[in-house]
Image: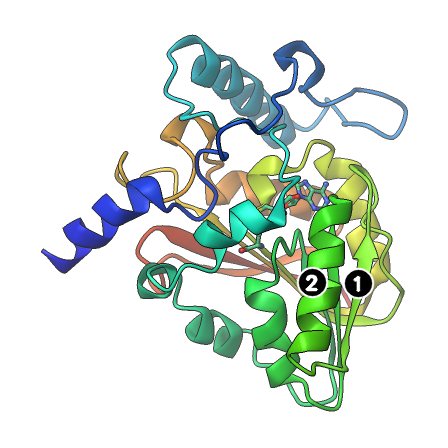
Amino acid sequence: MRTAVIAAIAGALVGCGKPPAGSPGQDPKNMSEKAGPEGHDHEASKERAFHAQEHEEEAQAYSDHRGRGHHKGHRFTDPAEWTAQFDSPERAAWQKPDEVVAALQLTPAMTVADLGAGTGYFTVRLAAAVPQGRVIANDLEPGMVRWIGERAAKEGLANVTTAQGDVADPKLPAGLDVALMVDTYHHIDEPTRFFGKVREALKPGGLLVVVDFKKDAPDDAPGPPAAMRVDDTLVAAHLTKLGLTHERTDRELLPYQYLVFMRKPG
Ligand SMILES: C[S@@+](CC[C@H](N)C(=O)[O-])C[C@H]1O[C@@H](n2cnc3c(N)ncnc32)[C@H](O)[C@@H]1O
């Protein structure tokens, strides 16, 4: 019953659902990933499957209008509007942010990146978990980056810095112990180049954790429609192809999302 109520609320207040009225759209034909010299190795069957699924499902999300206004390339330009969803108190019931942060097994002096940080829902929690360390909050949107900077200042979080990236490069400093990406993987337009840069920024032995929506979550679950969700096995396969080691996938901690744990070889 409680789950049903949460799911009903989440239909309106999803982790990254329908953009606010008036949010700019993007031409669908410009949104598929770009092939190129640094693009995808089409010899790898798993990666082929990954991209085939992405492209097919993206097209499907458009054609059957199940996209709830949600598509891979949609933009998050206005933090003042998105904060109502991202920072909604109801989200904690299914997002369990403290459990997610605990699963990272951070120590107080670590350097951590929050990839696609949005309005800083996880950034502020990560900052509390590494009081002698540092959190780099990355986002594509200048408005989000500015918002997080202001939020960190208001909340007295001196260990938060920001990094405005572009679609193919999060622009992270080297030396990360941990990188966390929540509800963002399915938005990354150029995953091969983007995660190649993440791998470079991680220390040897560093950890990347991707949290995103289960392919088989109920259709009315928070997050994108099923057609846009990326199966956890494809996430792990793609990141393995980029030179990270798949440590484990947790499908139990959260009701609608998985956590994929990838380690940079030491
Ligand atoms: C659904 S929100 C998730 C925000 C936050 N992680 C959370 O859990 O509340 C997705 C965020 O990813 C950002 N994003 C999308 N593509 C990105 C990219 N290539 N690099 C960095 N951020 C990106 C968007 O601007 C948006 O703020």
Return the disc, 1 or 2, that comes first in the chain's sequence. 2
Judged by depth in the image, the label closer to the viewer, 1 or 2, is 2
Instruction: Identify the colour scheme used.
Output: rainbow
Question: Disc 1 marks which amino acid?
Answer: Thr
Element assignment for label 2 = helix
Beta carbon at label 1 within 8 Å of ligand 1 = no
- Label 2 Cα crowd, 10 Å radius (few <14 / some 14-19 / many 20+): many
- Name the image quarter holding the C terminus: bottom right
Beta carbon at label 2 within 8 Å of ligand 1 = no
x and y percent of residue 130 in the render?
A: 67, 85
- Label 1 Cα crowd, 10 Å radius (few <14 / some 14-19 / many 20+): many
Q: Which residue does the numbered mark 2 point to in the structure image?
A: 148
Left or right, 170 with reference to 9: right
106 vs 5: above or below: below
Question: Disc 2 marks which amino acid?
Answer: Ile
248 vs 175: above or below: above
Q: Which residue does the numbered mark 1 point to in the structure image?
A: 162
Q: Which residue is depicted at the point 65% across and 87% down?
A: 107
Q: Is residue 217 visible?
A: no
Q: Which residue is depicted at the point 78% across and 54% down?
A: 198
x and y percent of residue 57 in the render?
A: 48, 20
